[in-house]
Image: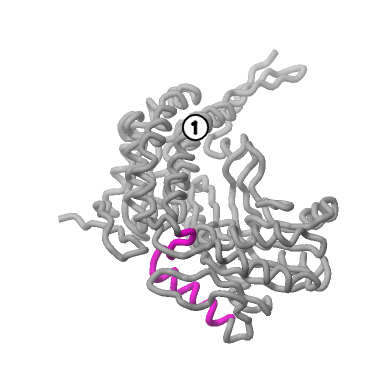
Amino acid sequence: MSATLTSLNPSTGEPVGEVPVTPSDRIAEVVARARAAQIEWGALTAAQRAEVLAPAGEKLVARADELGELLTREMGKPLREGIGEVRGCGASLAATAKEVADALAPETLEDDHTFSTVHHDPFGVCAVITPWNFPLAMPHWMVVPALIAGNTVVLKPSEETPLIAQAYADVLSEVLPANVLQIVHGADDQGKALVAADVDMIAFTGSRATGQAILGSAAAGLKRVILELGGKDPLVVLDDADIEKAAKFAVMNSFRNAGQVCVSTERIFVDESIASQFEDRMVEMLETMPVGDGMDEASRVGPMINATQRDHVLRQIDDAVASGARVVAGGKDHHDNFIHPTILGDLNDDMGIMRDETFGPVACVARFKDVDEAVARANDTPYGLGAVVFGGDEDRALSVARRLDAGMIGVNKGCGGASGSPWVGAKQSGYGYHGSKAGHRQFAQARVLSRAK
């Protein structure tokens, strides 16, 4: 009898459902099926593949309420966010597929002697390994460009959220040929087996440690790798910042999805002249962030995904307080997998909570004397995913932003860019990137065909 993987509701501890675990020694067979299916799938043009996949978007939108509830019960985020995640992916699927296809269209180049065409061809089989914090959006983010590029995909979702990932794969498979998209379930053993299998590229979102292990394993076969890894995103609040807007951003970006977001604000550096006012306004805004079961309409902050993540966050808080941090707000009434949003002050950069990724609902407020200090401290991390600067003088704020060592920096807003911008990390937060024409092309092999004039 095959083993099963039971998915638990992190709000209640009750089983949501189960899926069969894919035996590690069967993953090679799954990849072989994907390779056989890739021949016909790859023979289509990118535009044709986009046309095939587009109707799945309408199917996701039609089932947004149902699948959003499943997502919330399995992962814990507020129901409105779960439904929004499904609906957003579905509503954008056709446009995203066309955007990828346009990015992969052949390009022509010529000089006095040569006429060349740059084609963007499939690699073959792409392994996609995804996390639990956005358990439908993260697969979507990688599966769609991989498929439109002509690869077949073997998806290994987090063992914490297998049900919504299976539902997503099932919806897409309603419009795709057999074995173009397959899913394997399990934990570390299955992930390692998939990385070691006969795949041509690996797209992964998750922890820095796991990304390093994947990169090491992939090196033996020189497999293409795209990694979006952890973050320790800074927010720099200058002395002329709009305190209301900066504090609102800090609260929302520290506590949304219970802090389980790759670009959560994990370190807040505030000019000492306005720090007390900033902290006071954040405390007042905590009233807008009630904690509870995601199925409760009043909830804005759900649970940690599991007890391991809960214990990690609580340990960071306790260690910081023991080392002299001040609890500005929260820091108590935690229960089960729920951690009440906590604001800490009087922090120094040697504390673990200021150096290691937290991935929980904690806002760490540190004070600085001058801009050079703020920039140096913000950059003092191996991570470099996102960063944000708030300041009244926009030119000055932009100047500070240009000094921050991150892949995406927002000024008086979050770090996300305009439509078509890459989602890119610097330093150890990224290896390759997603989105944008260049990002989509990372799922394809550039091939130059030239002839003499």
Task: State the residue in front, 226 or 316.
Answer: 316
Taking the magenta stretch, the answer to whether it contains residue 69 is no
Mark 1 Cα shell of 10 Å, populated few (<14), some (14-19), many (≥20): many
The N terminus, quarter of image? bottom left
Q: For the point 68% across and 57% down, which residue is it?
A: 387
Q: Quadrant of residue 247?
A: bottom right
Relative to 395, is 104 on the left or the right? left
Q: State the residue at coordinates (43%, 32%).
A: 57
The number of callouts visible is 1
Does residue 192 appear in the picture of this structure? Answer: no
Location of residue 60 in the rendering, given as x and y in whole percent from the top left corner: 39, 36
Residue type (three-letter) at the residue carrying disc 1: Ala
Q: Quadrant of the C terminus?
A: top right
| Element marked by disc 1 | loop
Query: Which image quadrant for residue 342?
Result: bottom right
- On the image, numbered disc 1 is attached to which residue? 149
- Residue in the foreground of this view, choosing between 28 and 296: 296
Most extreme residue toward the top is: 453
- In the image, residue 212 sits, relative to residue 199, either above or below, namely below
In this rendering, position of residue 237 left or right of residue 331? right
Q: Position of residue 365 (x, y in %)?
A: 67, 71
Q: Which residues are magenta?
A: 299-320
